[in-house]
Amino acid sequence: MKMKILLIMTLSIFFFLLPSPSSAAIYKFVDDQGVIHFVDTYDLIPEKYRLRSSEEKLKEERKEEEMKPQTPVISTPKEEKEAAKEPEKKKSEDEIIEEWNKKLQEANDNIAKAKAALDEAERFENRTVSSYSRENYTNADRKAAQEATEAAKKNLEKAQKDLDELAEIARSEAPYSWWRENFYK
């Protein structure tokens, strides 16, 4: 009898001393580079991020499949200080304009290639149906020429659509003076 009472008392003390999962607090803060950090005590949050931090209670009901797998960010205070010392390299306006010029040149090159391919396909189609060389080509050649012309037209339309999309993206992302010089109509 004494053993049962002793066992019940020991188990009850054991269960009361276990930490409650609902009392665990996880603090989240985002640093200047946009990296999300999670810490378990408020004191580990750097002073400048404490106002932006938010407390999140973890619940046992949350299923693992709902949570996205994230790679943990482990950093020491020394690493954080070194990261804060290194300023981000920002591109100059000339570098940005150079990148946009490359994109525009590539789009224009694609249009020029598509036009050249369309011209060649139309010339071949015209040769297959002209009265002078009609005897040299079969109906299969004529059909192939028509299909090649249609494919070339679609390719040109796609290249033009890509250029139009580049113009729309450039309108909001490229420097205004560059956009106006290259796309303003």
Image (spheres, rainbow, N blue to C red):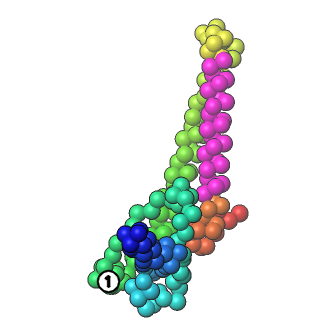
Amino acid bearing label 1: Pro
Q: Nearer the viewer, residue 124 or 40?
A: 40
**Quadrant containing the N terminus in the rendered view:** bottom left
Q: Is residue 148 left or right of residue 4?
A: right
Residue visible at 57% across and 34% down?
117
Where residue 53 appears, as percent x and y from the top left, is 51, 83
Secondary structure, mark 1, is: helix
Q: Quadrant of residue 33?
A: bottom left
Where residue 142 appears, as percent x and y from the top left, is 65, 17
Residue visible at 71% across and 63% down?
185
Say how many tags the image has. Answer: 1
Per the rendered image, the range of residues in magenta is: 143-166
Q: Quadrant of residue 48?
A: bottom left
Q: Residues within 10 Å of mark 1 (few under 14, many from 20)?
A: few
Where residue 34 appears, as percent x and y from the top left, is 47, 75
**Residue with the mark numbered 1:** 77
Q: Is residue 49 above or below residue 4?
A: below
Q: Is residue 11 left or right of residue 145?
A: left
Most distant residue in the top direction: 135
Helix, strand or loop for the magenta stretch, by majority: helix
Residue 25 in view (yes/no) = yes
Q: Nearer the viewer, residue 92 or 32?
A: 32
Residue visible at 53% across and 81% down?
55
Residue visible at 50% across and 68% down?
97
Residue 78: in magenta span: no
Q: Quadrant of residue 112?
A: top right
Residue 162: in magenta span: yes
Residue 90 in view (yes/no) = no
Q: Is residue 71 above or below residue 129?
A: below
Where residue 127 appears, as percent x and y from the top left, is 63, 20
Q: Nearer the viewer, residue 129 or 9?
A: 9
